[in-house]
Image (cartoon, helix red, strand yellow):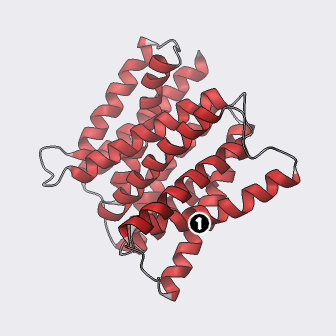
Amino acid sequence: MISSICFTLMAVMIKQVRHLPLMEIMLFRNIPTMIIIPIILIKTNISLLGNNKPILWLRGIMGTIGMLAMFYTFTVILLTDAMAIQQLRPFFVFFLSGIFLKEKLSLHQLPFFIFAFLGALLVIKPGLRIDMFPIIIALLAAVSTATVHVTLRYLRLTDHHLVIINYFAYISGIISLIMLFLQKTYKVPSLFDLFILILIGGIAFLAQIALTKAYQLSPASLVSLYTYSQIIFASIFDLIFFKEIPDIFSIIGASCIIISGYLNYRYKSNN
C-alpha cells in the first residue's frame, strides 16, 4: 500500500512539472537510486555488474521505454485513466509469460481478462476520444512494464534485486541524459520545480524499495492485488490536486479492472 501511494504521488508530482522536458524529469527520478544503490551494493560486497547481463540490459531498456511512456501519459490525461490502463499489465504478463516462458495458460482465467478488457474499453472510450495517441502510449507503457515483469522471472534466481534496480536506474538515467543533451531541451528548473523533481526521485526510490520488499514477504499474486489501489488513489489525488473528476465510463471501467484483478487473484489462490 505504501508503494501504491508513492507511485501515485509520483504521478501527481510529474503532472505538476509537466512543463519541463520528460527526459529531464526521468533523469531526476533516477538520481537518488543511482547514488544510493551502488553504495549499498559495495558495502554488502555484491557485484554491480550482475550475472545475467543480457536480460539485465533488456530489463533496463524495456523499463526505460515503459517509464517514458508512463510519464507522458501522466502529463496529458487524467491520472485515474492512466493508472487504470497501467493496471492491465498483469493481464499482458499472463499472455507474455505463456509465449516466452512457456508457462501453462489456464482457459478458466480467460473470462477475467475479457472482463478487464471491457473495462479498459470503457476507460479508453475509442469512439468518443478525439486524440487516441495518449491512450496508445499508455497501452505501450503497460505492455513494456509487463515485459519487464517477465524478464524479472528470469532474473529472480540469478541476480540480487538491488542489482536489477541499479541496472534499470543507470540505463534509464544515462539514456535520459544523452537524449536531453542531443535534444538540447534542458530547462533550468525554478526552486519550486527543483523541489518537486527531488521529491519525484525520493518518492520513486521509496516506492521501488517498498514494492521489492513486498514481493519478498508475500506471494506475487497477493502483492499485485494491492497495486490495483493505485486507481483509487489516483481518483482521490485527481480531485484534491487538479479538481478533475473521472467520467462515469472511466469509473465503471476502472471498477471492472479492479474486480477482474481480484477474481483472478482468488482463482490463483484456490488453485
Q: Quadrant of the C terminus?
A: top right
Residue 207 or residue 116, whichever sits in front: 207
Q: Position of residue 106 (x, y in %)?
A: 46, 13
Q: Residue furthest front?
A: 182
| Tag 1: amino acid | Gly
Please name the residue shown 42% across and 61% down the image: 179
Q: Position of residue 155 (x, y in %)?
A: 65, 31
Identify the residue under disc 1: 201
| Labels in figure, total | 1
Image side of residue 27 versus residue 120, left or right: right
197, above or below 176, in the image: below
Q: Position of residue 172 (x, y in %)?
A: 53, 54
Figure quadrant of residue 219 = top right
Q: Is residue 213 visible?
A: no
Figure quadrant of residue 214 = top right
Please name the residue shown 33% across and 42% down the image: 139
Q: Is residue 105 visible?
A: yes
Residue 57 or residue 32, whichever sits in front: 57
Q: Residue furthest bottom?
A: 191
Q: Position of residue 101 (x, y in %)?
A: 53, 18
Mark 1 neighbour class, 10 Å CA radius: few under 14, some 14 to 19, many 20 or more: many
112, above or below 174, in the image: above
Please name the residue shown 36% across and 52% down the image: 82
Residue 22 or residue 1, whichever sits in front: 22
Please name the residue shown 15% across and 52% down the image: 129
Q: Secondary structure at mark 1?
A: helix
233, above or below 91, in the image: below
